[in-house]
Amino acid sequence: MVGKIARWAACAVLVGTFLVTSVSWGQDTAAPAAEHPEAIHVEGEHAAAGNHGPKLGTLLAEWTVIPFTLLLLCIAVFPLVNPHWWEHNRNKGLIAAALAIPTAAYLAYLGNSGVHALEHAAKEYVSFLLLLGALFVISGGIYVRGTFQGGPLVNVIFLLIGTVIASIVGTTGASMLLIRPLLRANERRSRVAHIVVFFIFTVSNCGGLLTPLGDPPLFIGFLKGVPFDWTLRLWPQWLMVNGILLAVFLVWDTLALKWERQHLEQETPLPREPERFGIEGGLNFAFLAAIILIVIASGQNWGGLGGPGEPWPWGVAEVLMALAAIVSYLSTQKLVHEKNRFGFGPILEVAILFAGIFTTMIPALALLNVRGHELGLDETWEYFWVAGALSSFLDNAPTYLAFAVAACGVAGVPDDGRYLAAFLQLGPKAAATLAAVSCGAVFMGANTYIGNGPNFMVKAIAEENNVRMPSFFGYMAYSIGILIPIFIAVTFVFFK
């Protein structure tokens, strides 16, 4: 096991080295403006003419999106046709590298515009991964002790707490914090899969709509200029979706428990002595608070580290988040990690796949920005459904960014600097469009196992605890039957 972790760590280091090399190359060849370390916050993926050459989208043909499309297809298809082969991170890394390296080489060949795009994508990838990784590591050091009786009321309280804190500690943090005690609470029951499915719906996805900490796409939007508190205005959508889901779950779980009591001869005995409620690794709550403060401080320029009106220079928040995660991991007792069955496999999987995604999506984003008007998207409900549909089969962070860029392109806003701040200044129509993209990307990431990073991790933890989870299409039967009608209602209430 140690050898396997070491091999995947080496793989991640190689991917990171490749990205850092791209950064260094971009800093050597780009115009003087790129020398400023705050480039991740104030520069776009694709340079404006006169700064880094012509806009990248004008240099690219449609075929350049093929690697991105192929990577999405691999993520969607391989878990179905060859799950044993796909479960190895090495194989995911081979596919990601085979598609990302040629893309990066071609972009570099195009000159300063392509190099600048690679530099920006590398920085953004590091910021994204460090936030996700820090939340994953820190929450993995908190063990919620106790013997809970997993009835409908207790379960809905778990889901409600997770839904609320998902916007504070992130969908990943909330999922990792609560899924294990929820499974322990229901280990005497024979039908548990629906509980995990609703957990993915609410805690791992729909609960994270209210702050940039909640879900990776909103954090990326924050980096692009969306004010930190702007997403709080989405509370009506959050309340409607999660309120309906919790109500449906309460009815469903009540009927499921009633069926179990009628058809089972006896309950499964508890496998261990009852535990008193308590929390081990409580110091890690301080590290979670530190991550929240770091993200807020970096965007609001607390301490004046950035220029006037600008966020912190790139690298400051990233180093602080990494240090918080490292200190958290080293200061947590090994026994706590063992009780949580903590391992780095899930975050390594995310790191490998997203290295490929962030690289191969550069041409798609560039083309969307210069040709977004050709998509024919105009109404807010169209952005909600198109962004959501793609989020169902692609982790929702790049989906959010793709359609935010498309909306900017339609409105004539260049994707330079903190361009979403400029987009929001266009008025209510722009705000409604970004709200639709945000809701679509966050909510519909719950439609499939591959729609959002925590979905994979929750499913894996449940299966480790002997819960027989639905297949890929079995899970989609849940989402189509439960989520889609709710999203149709949301469309008519908020986006028509």
Image (tube, rainbow, N blue to C red):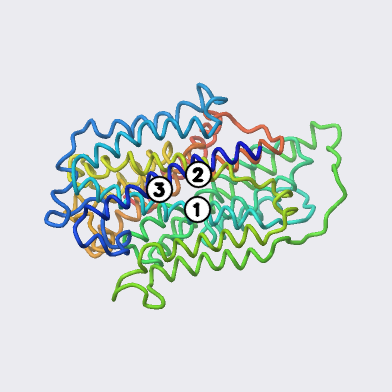
Q: Residues within 10 Å of mark 2 (few under 14, many from 20)?
A: many
Q: Amino acid at mark 1?
A: Leu
Q: Are marks 2 and 3 in contact (CB under 8 Å)?
A: no
Up-down: is 127 above or below 476? below
Crowdedness of circle 3 by 10 Å Cα count: few (<14), some, many (20+)? Answer: many
The residue carrying mark 1 is 132
Instruction: Please state the horizontal and vertical placement of residue 233, each as a whole percent of the image.
Output: 40, 64
Given this view, does label 1 or label 2 mark the residue nearer the observer?
1
> Decide: marks 1, 2 in contact (CB < 8 A)?
yes
Which sits earlier in the primary sequence, circle 1 or circle 2? 1
Residue assigned mark 2: 453
Question: What label sits on residue 479 in the rendered view?
Answer: none
Which secondary structure lies at badge 3?
Answer: helix
- The type of residue carrying mark 2 is Gly
Residue at 26%, 49% in the rendered image: 117
The amino acid beneath tag 3 is Ala
Disc 3 to disc 1, how far (Cα)? 12 Å
Mark 3 vs mark 1: give the one in front.
1
Q: CA distance from mark 2 to mark 3?
A: 10 Å
270 or 319, nearer to the observer: 319
Image position of 276 (left or right of 462): right
